[in-house]
């Protein structure tokens, strides 16, 4: 199934939406790689993209939640921590032999994350973050959105 970001997924902060578009793009890449049978190379690249997602998106989002005094920030950060632990475990198990299994596992993990974290937990801070000046400023401190960043870097490597 091909996923597409729509306005109904917006959390009210354009840079964060752009990061989420990057994650949806990665889910689609993963699906393509499973059907094309080239999971090793794709997974190798995807894992570094996911490290970017952790280092840039999660930190951006946490600063935004703090900037708009979102009361559920600590619990939200804990969920981010679970994602970090999952990706760490995946990287440890990654090899040519395990790539196909891990790709399937990661695909269902990310779909679940989209449905249960992004569309519920991230969406919950929207009323606090939308139109909030300090939140928008906090988001900008981490540079361009990951989807834009990804498109620029793939254009450069061509
Ligand atoms: Fe998010
Ligand atoms: Fe989040």
Image: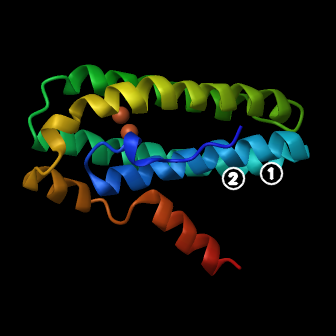
| Quarter of the image that includes the N terminus | top right
For residue 41, the mark is 1
| Quarter of the image that includes the C terminus | bottom right
Task: Indicate left or right for 21 with 134 as reference.
Answer: right
For residue 112, the mark is none
Residue 135 image point, x, y percent: 15, 50
Secondary structure found at label 1: helix
Residue 143 image point, x, y percent: 33, 65
Q: Is mark 1 within 8 Å of ligand 1?
A: no
126 shown above or below 143: above
Q: CA distance from mark 1 to mark 2?
A: 6 Å
Q: Quadrant of residue 43?
A: top right
* Rendered residue at 17%/46% (across/down): 130
Q: Quadrant of residue 99?
A: top right
Q: What is the crowding at mark 2: few (fewer than 14 residues within 10 Å), some, or many (at least 20)?
A: few
* Rendered residue at 29%/48% (across/down): 60
Task: Indicate left or right for 116 with 78 as reference.
Answer: right
Residue 57 image point, x, y percent: 38, 47
Residue 86 image point, x, y percent: 56, 25
154 shown above or below 19: below
Q: Are marks 1 and 2 in contact (CB under 8 Å)?
A: yes
Q: What is the crowding at mark 1: few (fewer than 14 residues within 10 Å), some, or many (at least 20)?
A: few
Secondary structure found at label 2: helix
Kindly identify which residue carries mark 2: 45
* Rendered residue at 25%/39% (across/down): 62
* Rendered residue at 49%/51% (across/down): 21
In depth, the one of 151 and 44 nearer the eye is 151
Image quarter where ligand 1 lies: top left
In depth, the one of 55 and 6 nearer the eye is 6
Q: Is mark 2 within 8 Å of ligand 1?
A: no
């Amino acid at each position: 199934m091909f996923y597409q970001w729509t306005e109904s997924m917006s959390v009210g902060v354009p840079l964060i939406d752009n990061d989420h578009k990057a994650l949806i793009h990665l889910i689609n890449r993963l699906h393509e790689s499973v059907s094309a049978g080239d999971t090793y190379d794709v997974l190798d690249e995807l894992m570094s993209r996911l490290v970017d997602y952790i280092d840039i998106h999660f930190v951006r989002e946490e600063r935004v939640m703090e900037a708009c005094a979102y009361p559920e920030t600590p619990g939200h950060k804990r969920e981010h921590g679970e994602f970090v632990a999952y990706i760490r475990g995946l990287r440890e198990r990654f090899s040519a032999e395990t790539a196909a299994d891990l790709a399937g596992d990661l695909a269902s993990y990310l779909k679940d994350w989209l449905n249960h974290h992004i569309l519920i937990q991230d969406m919950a801070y929207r009323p606090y973050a939308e139109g909030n000046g300090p939140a928008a400023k906090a988001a900008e401190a981490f540079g361009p959105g990951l989807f834009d960043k990804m498109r620029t870097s793939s254009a450069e490597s061509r």
